[in-house]
Image: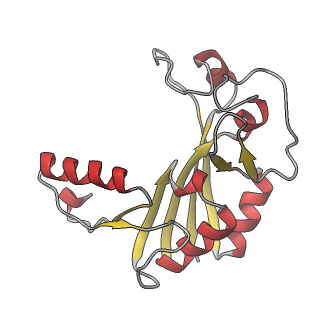
Amino acid sequence: MARRGEHPVAIDSSRAQLASARGFQREFGLDFPLILAEGEHVPLADASFDVALSEYGVSIWCDPYSWVPEAARLLRPGGELVFVVNGTFLMLCVPDEDVLAGDQLLRPYFGMHRFEWPEDESVDFHLGYGDWIRLLRANGFDVEDLVELRPQEGAVPSHRLASLDWSRRWPCEEAWKARKR
């Protein structure tokens, strides 16, 4: 994006991730702001951006009832919000964070929100489809697309929670696209 004349800003809550990003900026001759901040509280002005993108960052690790309003605050009217999350079916079928998903539903769909894992201290946030749509609309977004990702022929296994066979039968990742009214 920077090479195309855009003005990206990277925001992360991890100093280590930002240090890696600085290294990549040096390696590839890029320079744009890297900001240490929580996705729910970004220290930038209202209507600062045309696009907000999260690929497994704020879209999973932060409570959507906090980060979606913050994204709405940061985006200009007509701005796009694009985010990738673990698939809803995946979250219903995975028994534990370190075990591959099976073919049975293991937790309820209704009331999905906060997922805590017994083997570590991490917390993920996942919503059902209707809850996502209602939350986005309540914050001034229109949903433009939901892409349920599926591996192409010749793909190699790469998801830590789903086998390649599982991922060909059910979406293990979802990409949402919404536009601020």
User: Is 22 or 139 nearer to us in this picture?
Assistant: 22
Where does the image place residue 96, in percent across and percent down from the top left? Answer: 72, 30
Residue 76 appears in the figure: no
Q: Residue, x 70% and y 39% (percent of image)? A: 117
Q: Is residue 148 above or below residue 98?
A: below
Q: Quadrant of the C terminus?
A: bottom right
Left of 164 or right of it: where is 33?
Answer: left
Which corner quadrant holds the N terminus?
Answer: bottom left
Residue 18 appears in view: yes
Name which quarter of the figure residue 177 lies in.
Answer: bottom right
Where is residue 180, by image quadrant?
bottom right
Taking depth in this image into account, of 62 and 159 the one nearest to the observer is 62
Question: Looking at the image, is 61 positioned above or below residue 155?
Answer: below
Rendered residue at 78%/36% (across/down): 92
Relative to residue 42, is residue 32 drawn left or right? Answer: left
Q: Is residue 164 above or below residue 62?
A: above
104 lies left or right of 16: right
In the picture provided, is 31 more to the left or to the right than 169?
Answer: left
Q: Residue at x 46, y 17 (%)?
A: 156
Total number of numbered discs in the rendering: 0
Towards the viewer: 47 or 33? 33
